[in-house]
Image (tube, helix red, strand yellow):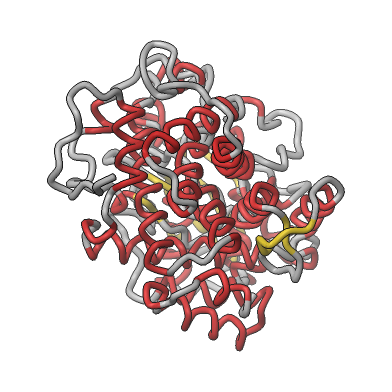
């Protein structure tokens, strides 16, 4: 098969699944712009760092134990562990680790709407291939970049109406498709094989369950974004294709396509194919500065700026008021979280952690979760509805907020309404921030020296002849 260049038109008669499969299997990595490859490298680095920071958590240890009970040892390494599983189980466990602290990346559209956490599913799937067979660092970056591209286009193409969003939505179920592309590309699938694997991956995607995360009956579900099942579905889909089985044909196409299976009431197929290979979307993928739900980030950014601008120590704070959307106040104001997942969706906990200047990879360690100082400060964080923030959320699904801090000496400090979250298109992280975040995250599992060695490897990932072997030597 001749690999298409970025200028090759897609066949007019091809459905979107066939077009996407042809792109994913055959696009020449040399046609990916340098800036897109550089962005893909950052997201690979960020995902691995998040996984290493999440690996030692009690929640992740329980996930690993449950997986170990049914999965045989295999060549695909588990982050933070000396052991490995087969590719499907490893993808599941590694994706769970990458999302364990809710520190992993995201995707936003032009209006700032959040659309999933692709890195955990996509990078975990690609890792399984790299541990299973020799894969160059350049090929790894290519596969991840192509997977992000299709993932981003797919979720934007199947965005529901606001009315349907309020009834049913799945944050990351579509990522099974991107995971299959990342793994399938590195396992050498051709276009026909990729389409067959995507048929399996889409059919295996779990139900869209955002409305059943236990918002009213805490603690929240362990797999709150279901990134691990998406990684598992993608890798398993490729494995079943390679076993000679038949998946759903044209799984993305038509009135019964994946968009309908995942609860959407509308689909714009042209978003999947228009400019595919010529216009790239990785610039819309975000990297988090805080280990917390992305919907909190604009408000947390406002709080952090207020603390820094006025050099406010935690012990001087009498009270904090979060002014934001009513729905966010309903779901995100639990001051005494029962689990790390609950804490990741808690304004009081995150604001107390910011005020105490806690190391971000360690926000949810047992000592901090039980800290009297942190919990006392969290108890003094309250909420108030902000009309402008509520209008943005109800009209555009765009979270925003502002913060007011009252000090014990009677001084008041107020932030303006923050709409743009740090780490996104409008407010990118400063130069070197992703590397610094990775070093801090990786050090949780590897120590400072091990983290520095892995960072040096990832800085030159595209020159590495066998990225799986190189990673295995440093994990």
In the rendered image, the residue lying farthest to the top is 255
**Image side of residue 456 versus residue 395, left or right:** right
Does residue 403 appear anywhere in the picture?
A: no
Assign the C terminus to one quadrant of the image. Answer: bottom right
**Image side of residue 411 versus residue 267, left or right:** right
Question: Where, by quadrant of the figure, is residue 245 drawn?
Answer: top right
Residue located at (43% from left, 76% from top)? 464
In the rendered image, the residue lying farthest to the bottom is 449
**Image side of residue 282 versus residue 202, left or right:** left
**Does residue 450 lie above or below 305 as drawn?**
below
Does residue 242 appear anywhere in the picture?
A: yes
In the rendered image, the residue lying farthest to the right is 69
Q: Nearer the viewer, residue 307 or 398?
A: 398
Residue located at (44% from left, 50% from top)? 188
Count all numbered tags in the image, as a single digit. 0
Q: Position of residue 244 (x, y in %)?
A: 57, 33
Q: Position of residue 431 (x, y in %)?
A: 33, 74
**Does residue 328 lie above or below 360 as drawn?**
above
Residue located at (55% from left, 30% from top)? 200
Q: Position of residue 412 (x, y in %)?
A: 47, 60
Residue located at (38% from left, 77% from top)? 463
Assign the N terminus to one quadrant of the image. Answer: top left
**Does residue 255 lie above or below 39 as drawn?**
above
**Image side of residue 195 versus residue 14, left or right:** right
Q: Position of residue 453 (x, y in %)?
A: 54, 85
């Amino acid at each position: 098969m001749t690999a298409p260049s970025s200028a090759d038109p897609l066949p007019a008669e091809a459905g979107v699944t066939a077009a996407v499969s042809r792109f994913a299997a055959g696009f020449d990595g040399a046609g990916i712009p340098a800036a897109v490859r550089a962005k893909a490298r950052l997201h690979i680095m960020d995902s691995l760092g998040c996984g290493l920071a999440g690996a030692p958590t009690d929640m992740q240890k329980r996930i690993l134990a449950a997986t170990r009970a049914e999965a045989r040892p295999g060549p695909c390494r588990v982050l933070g562990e000396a052991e490995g599983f087969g590719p499907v189980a490893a993808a599941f466990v590694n994706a769970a680790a990458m999302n364990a602290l809710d520190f992993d990346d995201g995707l936003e559209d032009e209006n700032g709407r959040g659309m999933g956490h692709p890195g955990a599913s996509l990078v975990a799937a690609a890792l399984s291939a790299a541990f299973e067979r020799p894969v160059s660092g350049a090929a790894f970056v290519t596969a991840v970049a192509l997977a992000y591209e299709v993932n981003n286009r797919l979720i934007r193409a199947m965005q529901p109406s606001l009315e349907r969003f309020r009834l049913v939505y799945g944050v990351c179920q579509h990522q099974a498709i991107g995971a299959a592309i990342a793994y399938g590309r590195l396992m050498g699938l051709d276009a026909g094989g990729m389409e067959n694997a995507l048929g399996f991956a889409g059919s295996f995607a779990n139900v869209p369950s955002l409305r059943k995360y236990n918002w009213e009956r805490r603690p929240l579900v362990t797999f709150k974004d279901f990134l691990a099942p998406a990684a598992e579905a993608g890798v398993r889909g490729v494995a079943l294709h390679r076993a000679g089985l038949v998946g759903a044909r044209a799984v993305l196409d038509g009135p019964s396509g994946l968009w309908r299976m995942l609860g959407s009431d509308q689909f714009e197929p042209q978003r999947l194919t228009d400019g595919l290979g010529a216009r790239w979307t990785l610039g819309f993928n975000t990297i988090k500065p805080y280990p917390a739900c992305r919907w909190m980030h604009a408000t947390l950014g406002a709080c952090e700026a207020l603390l820094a601008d006025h050099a406010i120590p935690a012990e001087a704070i009498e009270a904090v008021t979060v002014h934001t959307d009513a729905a966010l106040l309903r779901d995100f104001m639990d001051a005494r979280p029962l689990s790390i997942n609950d804490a990741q969706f808690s304004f009081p906990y995150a604001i107390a952690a910011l005020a105490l200047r806690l190391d971000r990879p360690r926000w949810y360690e047992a000592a901090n979760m039980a800290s009297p100082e942190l919990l006392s400060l969290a108890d003094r964080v309250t909420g108030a509805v902000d009309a402008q923030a509520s209008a943005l959320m109800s009209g555009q699904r765009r979270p925003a907020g502002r913060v007011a801090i009252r000090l014990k000496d009677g001084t008041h400090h107020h932030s303006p309404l923050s709409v743009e979250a740090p780490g996104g298109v409008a407010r990118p992280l400063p130069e070197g921030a992703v590397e610094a975040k990775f070093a801090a995250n990786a050090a949780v599992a590897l120590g400072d020296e091990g983290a520095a060695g892995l960072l040096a490897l990832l800085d030159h990932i595209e020159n590495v002849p066998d990225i799986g072997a190189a990673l295995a030597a440093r994990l």
